[in-house]
Amino acid sequence: MKRHLVSAADLSRDDALLILDTAEELAQLSGRAVKKLPTLRGRTVVNLFFEDSTRTKTSFEVAEKRLSADVINFSAKGSSVSKGESLKDTALTLQAMGADAVVIRHHASGAPARLAQSDWLHGSVINAGDGTHEHPTQALLDAFTMRRHLNPGAGHDLAGRRVTIVGDVLHSRVARSNVHLLNTLGAQVTFVAPPTLLPIGIENWPCEISYDLDRVLPKTDALMMLRVQRERMNAAFFPTEREYSRRYGMNGLRLAQLPGHAIVMHPGPMVRGMEITAEVADSPRCTAVEQVANGVSVRMAVLYLLLGGATLADAPADAPRTETVEIAQ
Amino acid sequence: MTAHRDSTPQDQAPRPPHQVLDGTDIARVITRIAHEIVERAKGAEDVVLLGIHTRGVHLARRLHGRLAQITGREIPLGTLDITMYRDDLRLKPARALEHTEIPPGGIDGKLVVLVDDVLFSGRTIRAALDALNDIGRPRAVQLAVLVDRGHRELPIRADYVGKNLPTSLREAVQVRLSDSDGVDAVLVGDRDFTAASRSALTEQGAQAAKPTEPHLPE
């Protein structure tokens, strides 16, 4: 494993399977009376969220607390960032406070990569979504959910499974991370979206493209619906919402066209009536709620694998602070 | 005389490991421990066997089979991975986790018998006790080991011992079980020799199974 998790493309097949297998073990924990492990005792994890998030932030926080890490929440609203502090100065502050890992969500694509490449911070950097770039832990939890349904078992990958991702690919960091990771795990990815919502250069991605949802449905093992990100839209990408949901929305009739074993996934938040009808969202084949539960296990696995063993901060020359903490223990 | 012997180069070369228990010895030891468990637990009615990864799991499975023959009942059997509770986690890169499986009946109010291959520093058992604490509240916890090699670093002892094996810290104890190593045997040798032969094995890649981890002081 690398020291940081910035992009799903950085993960080799072995890394990805190690994370998924570890998550599978950690998932057992949610059934126990004491849902806590002492593994990250004494490690400090900062959740640095420059952008609104409920699901991801809560999920990371639960994962950190279940591993007994000390959690510091830092959101841009009401902090020195709103007073004009730069990312560098925020990072230097966190380093001075002794952060062993930073979970960062930023509205600018590349902010986590900047943080990981710089020497502002000695700890691990985990990307929790940057702009329209990547969201690797979401891709990992999606792959984890798919593996549980389509090819369960430790060490298994998604070879030959067909995944269809429908909707606003242009603004979706989830789609970008997913296409890299699913490709690494051997799955075939097909994007279905209006041409205006596909990014330039998508022909170089390891995926297929279709504009006809109904034709792709019968050949799909996992269908992933993406939300239309209206907050990032600065132009008219499609004529009306009704037209979008008729051509690219998931409804009961389309659900019947899917093979019997296929699952419908949604990274959330869902907009019912837009990309997915209530009938599909509430059907047992929709895994949106299960994905949230799996998110905690996968994030625990990532945190454990990045922070659980010896880290750079444990080297005596680098961080005398960590050393004193360990002597005190 | 002793001083003279120590200085000869021949004696400083690592000695090859010699076998202290063979397959039939191990089978006999497991039968005896099974009988002891039945005797001490008065029929083993509320016993739960938990094997500690990796070789403790194989031993627990064998013990489970033997107990079924003796008592005529199925004793609950589980596995325990103690990686997340280790006190030396920060000395090495993060390790992959093994499968923890608690029997459906749980461990609350039961007599849990932990099973491991070698009892050495006692740190593995301390981690296992911590893990049990998070899983439930057993009536009592006992420990069964195939080999007790001494050199405890914590106040921990075994209730059922296959063989007491006085060793020096320069020695390494290797347990090989047919489930993972193709053969049943317990070997004692110089740790330098064991380390050398282990790296040779890894280079050859001849052995499909993972080479045994010698129980070295950490």
Image (cartoon, coloured by chain):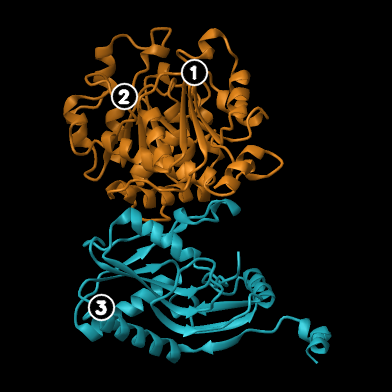
Chain colours: A orange, B cyan
Chain containing mark 3: B
Please name whichever residue, A21 or A149, is drawn nearer the observer in this view of the structure.
Answer: A21
Asked if residue B92 shows in the view, the reply is no
How far apart are the two marked residues, 3 and 1, measured between alpha carbons?
63 Å
Marks 2/1 in contact by CB < 8 Å: the verdict is no
| Residue matched to label 3 | B41
How far apart are the two marked residues, 2 and 1, measured between alpha carbons?
17 Å
- Does A139 sit left or right of A226 as displayed? right
Residue at 35% x, 34% y: name it.
A164
Q: Judge if badges 3 and 2 mark residues of a common chain.
A: no
Is B198 above or below relative to A48? Answer: below
Is A54 above or below relative to B159? Answer: above
Kindly report which numbered mark, 3 or 1, lies closer to the viewer in this rendering.
3
Percent position of residue A315, x then y: 67, 45
Residue at 29% x, 23% y: name it.
A248
Q: Amino acid at mark 2?
A: Pro
| Residue matched to label 2 | A269
The label on residue A107 is 1
Percent position of residue B209, x then y: 51, 71
- Does B43 sit left or right of A137 as displayed? left
Chain containing mark 2: A
Local crowd size for mark 2, using a 10 Å CA cut-off: few (<14), some (14–19), many (≥20): few
